[in-house]
């Protein structure tokens, strides 16, 4: 049987990985798929560069659209990123009856609904394992491995750059700015690291996982997104003293009245496995009613780890492309006519617990006034830590861990506490999740 | 569309979970699968008991074979365990053109080749996610998620009973016998715990993972199996001092001349994520060339976690049963005509490192003689720990960690060391893996 013919659009780091892995493991892949998979066409702006980077014999063209719709191409692999040209190419490939594999999380988090609908109409597959957590087969786990379950929540370390930075901040007691520079020097952070450190990349991935877990449409614009740029070494240290670590988590959770969808720094108990995921590694915890807690860990980025997911999708499509489209795995795990219309909850409706650090005057009655305000808002306290003030010092740090509460209630309590004359600086508030 | 009709054979803990999960999550499952899945027939010895345990309306029969071959049944779920009657029923179901789902690791590890061949001839699927690591979708990850990769090795905590016992031994400093009794009292160990504590259950699961990883036939009879019954609290303590934990691992690794397939207590660095998997939880680490290290964690046993895997298989079959059989995922991940004939290596050909504990006379020259023997066999030493002997004590403990060596060389060295007059007791030898 002639090999499945792939049109590869893009010639960057991941595309290079795809070319390499398909070449190096062609025998292993053929033995599994029962059919060869070959990159026959490449679309790239700079052809000379693409030829030398990819190092494979193929039909190279700078006409990306021509590759996306070429009659000899069975599957189009979109690896150029972005949401404008990429969207156009993916929709044209679909219209031309091509299956599509993409690693483009932004594209799917924002335009997934339109793209999946187009694919359904044409009876083609759009596969995107590489879009979330790189080489970890988390899309497959959520979409196929856990089909028996009502998924309750997902919490993931799904951005390697920020996890590397947080790991270094904790290990070395350094502040964010210092570690960011080191991360850039080592290649763990981009020159413009905004998408990573502000949580946008994580929110793209979380949006996709949330849709698959709960059968809702992708709604990136409804996600709450907070990065790690304001995190201070002090809070990492206090968290540690209280038995917690701080990670940038993407969290999505099913509640009675809707779905939580949020990315922010989060205290998690140090004894949880996910709290011990260090460096640029990714991990996703899934809580589901039948199976309980499962965790998936691996490299979330990089040339070959991401290529591993792209090629797995190519093998899936090779196996399944002859199957009746109605019997394939639905793009978003649930049948298109069985999607949920559960809304994404506004942030003040989210239920979570909190770490608070207050800089307070070291005088009688302060703690009582603060705990009084929390009690007024029905927020119960889990632990309190007051730093012993040095001799002559007039202020001290007061750390409070709360139990679960409505974020809206906490916002009100925070405003009242902040207004106290004995609260001397802006209160630091970090969300906390027990993850069990 | 009428629901897929399931014939459930068995009415034990897992069968109860399957009935419960299919019932409770029927809406969620239908939304995913696009079609209902219903247990319409139940085969069990004791019908009254089965009716009350399962609590579902179905056609109950004590004629197990009649259920396995019933014309109205689309998929047979075999949950009676054992390798005799279960084999017979599975083969009869296949012969009658039924798809089969089973959680029976022993059956597949021993008779998989015959069963998969029969299924292929009839064009039906035999699905077995529940046979390895309970609810963790590890079969799917290995067979579909990592298809791009040349898998190098797998190391797994794949028996919850023994991991619970080892966790307790470490946490409380107790010996095996004491903790086993506690585990039995708590329901973590069976009244006859032999299969678990002697490593047989883990070896069944490992055999299946190994076949899928490397494309070799299942060869349970070639596995090296060692349990945890001889493990002493002393060695757990010494390991901890050296930065290691002891876990019962199933390890399978590709070498130049064949495949390692072995279950035994193993020292692993305490900083590895898998070293921190506690209690009855399972975890599997997979090392593969493109993706690097991935880890999969969750409950490896229990009613609903195992049912989660069984039902996921039911959904897969529901989706795929109309697909051309040649395009389905092959039972053992590789196409039947592309299997490898790499042999399973004998234990003395295995490459691993070692922890040795020698009870030696506290006199000059002992260490030199012992290290001399190791050097003679080209075994290099990673670390040495000699316990300070108490005043008047004539003997002491000498702990040696080695680098990787051929097990055959170590056996020779051990024989020579054991023969030394200054070695006063049987040498304790535990294998060690760095897992990176």
Image: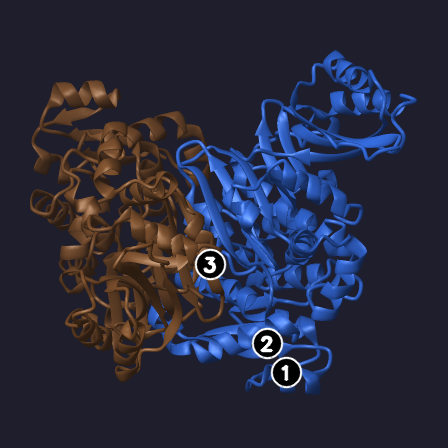
Chain colours: A blue, B brown
Pick the quarter of the image with the C terminus of chain B.
bottom left
Nearest the viewer among B202 and B169 is B169
Regarding mark 1 in the picture, which secondary structure is present there?
A: helix
- What is the chain identity of the residue bearing mark 3? B
Regarding mark 2 in the picture, which secondary structure is present there?
A: helix
Left or right: where A55 falls relative to B260: right
- Residue under numbered circle 2: A16
- What is the chain identity of the residue bearing mark 2? A
Gap in angstroms between the C-alphas marked 2 and 1: 7 Å
Q: Is residue B269 visible?
A: yes
Q: Is residue A323 visible?
A: no
For marks 2 and 1 on the same chain, the one whose residue lies earlier in the sequence: 2
Gap in angstroms between the C-alphas marked 3 and 1: 27 Å
Question: Image height check: is A160 above or below A271?
Answer: below
- Residue under numbered circle 1: A53
Do circles 2 and 1 both sit on a common chain? yes
- Residue under numbered circle 3: B294
Residue depicted at x 17% and y 72%:
B420
Q: Crowding at label 3, few (<14), some or many (≥20) Cα neighbours within 10 Å?
A: many
Task: Give the farthest residue toward the right.
Answer: A421
Q: Do the residues under discs 2 and 1 have CB atoms within 8 angstroms?
A: yes
Residue depicted at x 80% and y 46%:
A230
Regarding mark 3 in the picture, which secondary structure is present there?
A: strand
Q: Position of residue A70 (x, y in %)?
A: 59, 73
Nearest the viewer among A161 and A171 is A171
């Amino acid at each position: 049987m002639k090999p499945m013919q792939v049109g590869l659009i893009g010639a960057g780091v991941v595309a290079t990985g795809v070319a390499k892995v398909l070449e190096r493991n062609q025998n292993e892949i053929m033995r599994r798929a029962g059919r060869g998979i070959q990159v026959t066409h490449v679309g790239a702006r700079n052809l000379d560069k693409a030829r030398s980077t990819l190092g494979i014999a193929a039909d190279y063209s700078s006409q990306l659209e021509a590759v996306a719709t070429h009659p000899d191409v069975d599957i189009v692999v979109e690896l150029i990123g972005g949401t404008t040209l990429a969207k156009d190419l993916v929709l044209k490939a679909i219209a031309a009856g091509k299956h599509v594999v993409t690693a483009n999380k932004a594209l799917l988090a924002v335009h997934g609904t339109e793209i999946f609908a187009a694919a359904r109409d044409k009876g083609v597959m759009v596969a995107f394992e590489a879009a979330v957590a790189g080489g970890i087969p988390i899309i497959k786990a959520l979409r196929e491995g856990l089909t028996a379950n009502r998924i309750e929540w997902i919490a993931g370390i799904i951005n390697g750059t920020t996890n590397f930075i947080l790991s270094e901040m904790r290990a070395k007691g350094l502040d964010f700015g210092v570690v960011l520079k080191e991360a850039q020097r080592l290649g763990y952070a981009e020159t413009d690291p905004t998408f990573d450190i502000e949580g946008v990349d994580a929110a793209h991935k979380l949006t996709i996982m949330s849709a698959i877990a709960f059968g809702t449409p992708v709604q990136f614009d409804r996600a709450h997104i907070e990065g790690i740029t304001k995190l201070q070494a002090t809070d990492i240290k206090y968290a540690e003293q209280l038995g917690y670590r701080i990670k940038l988590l993407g969290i999505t959770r099913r509640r009675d009245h809707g779905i939580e969808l949020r990315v922010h720094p989060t205290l998690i108990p140090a004894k949880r496995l996910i709290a011990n995921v260090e460096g640029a590694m990714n991990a996703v915890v899934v809580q589901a009613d039948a199976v309980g807690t499962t965790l998936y860990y691996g490299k979330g980025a990089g040339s070959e780890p991401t290529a591993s997911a792209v090629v797995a999708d190519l093998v899936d499509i090779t196996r399944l492309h002859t199957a009746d489209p109605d019997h394939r795995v639905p793009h978003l795990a649930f049948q298109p006519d069985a999607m949920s219309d559960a809304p994404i909850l506004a942030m003040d409706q989210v239920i979570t617990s909190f770490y608070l650090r207050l800089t307070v005057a070291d005088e009688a009655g302060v703690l009582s006034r603060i705990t009084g305000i929390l009690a007024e808002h029905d927020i119960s306290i889990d632990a309190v830590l007051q730093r012993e003030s040095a001799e002559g010092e007039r202020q001290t740090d007061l750390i409070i861990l709360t139990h679960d509460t409505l974020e809206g209630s906490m916002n009100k309590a925070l405003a009242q506490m902040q207004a106290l004359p004995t609260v001397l600086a802006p209160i630091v508030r970090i969300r906390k999740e027990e993850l069990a």
